[in-house]
Image (cartoon, grey):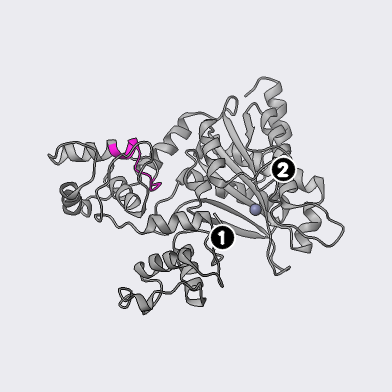
Amino acid sequence: MRVVRRGDRGPAVTEIRGILVGLGLIPGAHAASSGSEFESSDFDDATEQAVRAFQQSRGLSVDGAVGAETWRALVAARWRLGSRTLYQAIPEPLIGEDVRTLQERLLEMGYDVGRADSVYGARTAHAVAQFQREVGLAPDGACGPQTMHALRRLGRKVTGGRPQWLRESDAFRHSGPNLVGKTVIVDPGHGGPDPGVVVPEGELRWTEAELAYDMAARLEGRLAAAGMRVHLTRGPAPAGELTDLERAQLANELGGDLFISLHIDGHVNPEADGVATYHYGTDHGAASTVGERLAGLVQREIVVRTGLRNCQTHAKTWELLRLTKMPAVRVEVGYLTSPLDRAKLVDPRFRDQVVEAVVAAVQRMYYPIDQDVPTGSIDVRELRAALAAGAL
Ligand SMILES: [Zn+2]
């Protein structure tokens, strides 16, 4: 869809404003929303502020404009748990904030719905049926008024760990320290018609898309040398743009054990610099502990090995992180708009250091926690030698 932003007007803007008013994000307008004279089709300052507040609250990129991802989140946000009956619809599943609330409540109660991804799929229906059976309702897997009543009655009393993430950690611990045969999906950002961050001036003609691909190809080589199966989500010059949704679907189809997306950041302020890593999570506590650990390891290894400024790890609900079924991270390796970072990024030895840092982080993911090693201590060349000697 076309991006809708400040200055635009028309029916799409009316609809966006309607949702934001319903969420109470456009102040003062809520009480008057029934009178049509208050309906505005102008994307004004207040609308942009409301969009920003919405994006912030949902862990989306905050740009104040409504693109495809923000639009889907807005449509989903219309639904409050209890305002409609939820069931497993085929082939188009029900998606919405109400589904996510239900999933998080079930997770807290110990039911296995997988990830709270806002999609009412088979696993959610199964968990609902299990809940229904245990409270004496007909286990039809649909969440209607009776099930809602039972949830309200019990939901608040039972809280515990985050069983799905505990299971995810367990699967990891039991998969052993061996990298051989595990599948990593490496996702170079942007590509094709979308160059990502571009710095038109200066001697550097690299775009973000080219740098991301270069690092992805280096990473592919290193991980493959360590015995892992590696898939890239795109080639050096794809014909079309690949959305984050398509990248996530591809990773799921390929059955990846880990997902690593590589980007370079950009900012209007040339003084912005440093590396940041993102993993799936929300402000209200649902997080992928394995994804969080991978993000922490990647971030620390890169900081220690390259000296890039540490811009920390952050929880986001981006589709790329939310819809991938394996632990997933997105790394923003420095700022192409920073003269400091740019000078490093154009140096192939620096890009090798970044790649070695990611390989070390991946290796540490598969060590049992009690055998973990200090950051910066894994020598990737030794790893390869050991592999060649048959020691791993
Ligand atoms: Zn990017």
- Residue at image point 25% right, 40% down: 128
**Secondary element at tag 2:** helix
Residue located at (85% from left, 61% from top): 202
Badge 1 or badge 2: first in the primary sequence: 1
Which corner quadrant holds the N terminus? bottom right
Within the magenta stretch, is there residue 248?
no
371 versus 11 height, above or below:
above
Front in this rendered view, residue 16 or 356? 16
Is any part of residue 29 visible from this angle?
A: no
Residue 121 located within the stretch drawn in magenta: yes
Point out residue 38 in the picture as x, y percentages from the top left corner. Answer: 37, 78
In the image, taking residue 326 as reference, residue 382 lies left or right, namely right
Considering the numbered disc 1 on the image, is that residue within a helix, a strand or a loop?
loop
- At x 69%, y 46%, the residue is 191
**Residue denoted by label 2:** 213
- The magenta segment is 116-125
- Magenta portion: prevailing SS class: loop
Which residue corresponds to mark 1? 3
